[in-house]
Image (spheres, coloured by chain):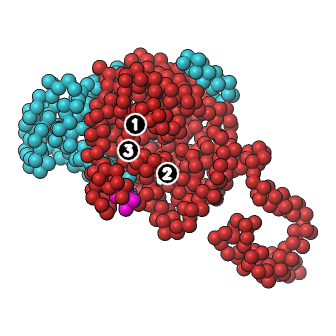
Amino acid sequence: MTASKDHILSQLRKQSVPKTELPDLQDAKLKAQWVTYADPAQQFSDTLESVGGLCWRVKNIEEVNQRLAELPVYQESNQICSLVSDCGQPTMNVNEVTDPHDFKDVDFAILPGEFCVAENGAVWTTNDGGPQRTLYFLSQHVALIVPASEIVPHMHAAYDRLTFENPSFGTFMSGPSKTADIEQSLVIGAHGARSLTVFLVEEPF
Amino acid sequence: MPSHPKLAEAFVKDKERARWHDQSLWFVRSKRDKAVHQLPEWELLREQASKIKSYTVSHLPDLLEEFERNAKAKGVHVHWARDAKEHNEIVHSILQKHQVKRIVKSKSMLTEECHLNPYLERHGIEIVDTDLGEWIVQLQDKPPSHIVMPAIHIKKEEIGELFHEKLGTEKGATDPQYLAESARQHLRRKFIEADAGITGVNFAIADTGGFVVCTNEGNADLGTGLNKLHIACMGIEKLIPRASDLSVFLRLLARSATGQPITTYSSHFHGPKPDGEMHIVLLDNGRSEISGSDEFRRSLNCIRCAACMNTCPVYRRSGGYSYNNTVPGPIGSILGAAHDTKKHSSLPFACSLCASCTDVCPVKIDLHHQLLTWRKEIRLKGLLPLSKRLSMKMMGWMMQAPRLYQFAGTCARWVVPYLPRFLLYNRFNAWGKQRELPDIPKQSFREWMKKNHDRK
């Protein structure tokens, strides 16, 4: 195996490839040209809706609970998980779960999101990669709870916030899962969540 | 190996279907345009992406070592494979060690390139492609015809029939919602039962040792989240130097591919989960050789968005299978010719040199220039078919002799209008297969000039 590594590296080093420069993405002149939005929250909300998601701008967790109670898919859910304290009426204790397969019948998951990206309606979510990571993808419906102040305009600002020093798992989630693999017809609910609701919460929680 | 025109023949014959295929892809291309026009900095992004990739290729060995170091520091096992055979053996040996019997795999053109599925199946391992399009073609026992939309060439009636036969769905069902839901139910079971997850890699990050996988369906995340063992397979050109470079590429990728602002899921894997194991297989398979070529090096910039095939007038009208290569379309014709020039010698000719591919490429690969250069290479290697060699020789000869050229022109203007069809439209005239020759003018341009201008 080291033989193959050495072979590939020496193959590459054998080629004469003119060295080129790496662009500086922090260059002020470049950064000044990235798109900006007068109302990033509105842009986020509009973009999320355009990719099949739903965005609510709310005051606090209580209001999230009210909105959830009005949501038909939430009302119909039998198994509910929540990783946000005082949010929703969870029917199972996620901390007791050690095997992600035990989440296979979860209908609705209420999960934290770290920040939103206005340009593409994505929410950055992260965790240690334990069984709870599966909730973001295996649950039939997902609600993400994000502080309203945590919105960046574009992906450059998003990566300014991210470091990957330790082992971790993180995902930009933009809307519910979807496919257009059958004759280009959009179907919402491919393998992941069938619906995605993002709550932008004003007050700290 | 049958040539591109030969393989395209059957596809072109069904005019209605070829038209439908053409329009489906043009619809995707139009969505791309709409998304692109919403970003005033689009061209600037393309430039950055192209520069980042050029830098990567020019520092590839160092960056690969940096990647390996950082990935290992996060607990990832890194493997190196010279070719497809070694790649498959590595994957199989990992699976054997874990006594894996069932695998779920998210979309990976690299594993298609290596023919991993049949290899593992021969060793008694079940492998299920979980991307809906790729699963449809897997059920048909066929390869993908497009790298982003593997089943773009199949009609919903055929998918309904296939699902009825394989999954027992209602006969005659054609509703995409119903068919996709049936697939969801069926594949959920596969996800739950699997012992390991295999994914491709969209971007691997040298300075963090992590990698990113993009899907719309969430299948890569389900397949890896539920299983302790995750194997990610990537070509060595998938590397980028810094995590911040992702900001450029994730803005470009989905917009170029389907016109979405970003894929639904862009997952960043840095190390295995707490009780799991993660392996990365780095594959060369001819890529290192391409890096040495001044003409074709930039083809390694490719991020597999498929914008070039969606816009290509030849791809749209001849279908992915006519290329007989894992990656079809303009970029596939370049990569195919580089991998096995003899086998794929007709591909660089499946191009009208319209340059639309070059215009839409998010990493600024000079696709049509490279296709033209490949034609020259193929000629130099003596791989041109006799018909092309002869006609070009004759043309070259005539073009160098003005008098002969004029004489031939005069003769043609006199004779051609009176020739019977079988002499004009036969197997020597490939151009005339689906086209009528234009009306022959009464006089040549030279004669017209003489008459109208030379007197002054």
Colour that chain B carries in the picture: red
Name the secondary structure under disc 3: loop
Query: Considering depth in this image, is B281 or A121 the residue closer to the camera?
Result: B281
Query: Pointers 2 and 3 in contact (CB under 8 A)?
Result: no
Q: Earlier in the sequence, mark 1 or mark 2?
A: 1
B269 relative to B163, above or below = above
Q: Which mark is residue B131?
A: 3
Chain corresponding to cyan in the figure: A
Name the secondary structure under disc 2: loop
Mark 3: which amino acid? Asp
Residue B122 x %, y %: 47, 34
Q: Is residue B83 visible to the viewer in this orientation of the structure?
A: yes
Q: Which quadrant would the C terminus of chain B be assigned to in this image?
A: bottom right
User: Left or right: B154 with respect to B423?
Assistant: left
Q: How far apart, in angstroms, are the residues tagged by discs 1 and 3?
A: 12 Å
Residue A15 is one of the magenta-drawn residues = no
Span colored in magenta: B156-160
Mark 2: which amino acid? Ser
Instruction: Mark 1 vs mark 3: tell me if same chain.
Output: yes
Residue under pointer 1: B127
Query: Considering depth in this image, is B298 or B123 the residue closer to the camera?
Result: B123
Residue under pointer 2: B145
A163 relative to B430, above or below = above
Residue B393 x %, y %: 84, 57
